[in-house]
Image (cartoon, rainbow, N blue to C red):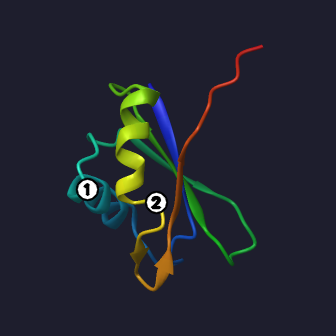
Amino acid sequence: MARIWIGNIEPDTSDEELRELLAKYGFPTCDALERVASDGSRPAAIATFEGASPEGLRMLVPRIHDLFWKHRKLTVQVLRDNFA
């Protein structure tokens, strides 16, 4: 399992639009999308990919990191899972 952070999303963007964007740029099927609470100025979401590795997603992230989409420049990164 691997996850990516997608930040600075246009507030009215639907989950379906996010899934379509990821598919358009070659990401595997997203298994879950979780919206991240914020003050509203830079909404974000976490996309989870059950069958993907962090290394595989790191190769894909440059396709959409800094992409200008829906009047905003996206910030995308692979999240690390910290196990204590």
Q: Secondary structure at mark 2?
A: loop
Depth order, front residue of 14/73:
73
| 62 with respect to 45 (left or right) | left
Indicate the quadrant containing the C terminus: top left, top right, bottom left or bottom right: top right
- The residue labelled by disc 1 is 25
Q: Amino acid at mark 2?
A: His
Which of the marked residues, 2 or 1, is nearer the chain's N terminus? 1
Q: Position of residue 45 (x, y in %)?
A: 54, 56
Q: Secondary structure at mark 1?
A: loop
Residue pictured at 61% horizontal, 68% vertical: 43
> How many marks do you count on the picture?
2
Left or right: where 71 falls relative to 31: right
Q: Residue 59: x and y, percent?
A: 37, 39
- Whether 9 is drawn above or below 71: the answer is above
* Residue of label 2: 65
- The structure residue drawn at horizontal position 50% and vertical position 80%, both measured from the top left corner, is 72
User: How many C-alpha atoms fall within 10 Å of the one at disc 1: few (<14), some, or many (≥20)?
Assistant: few
* Label disc, if present, on residue 33 of the rendered structure: none
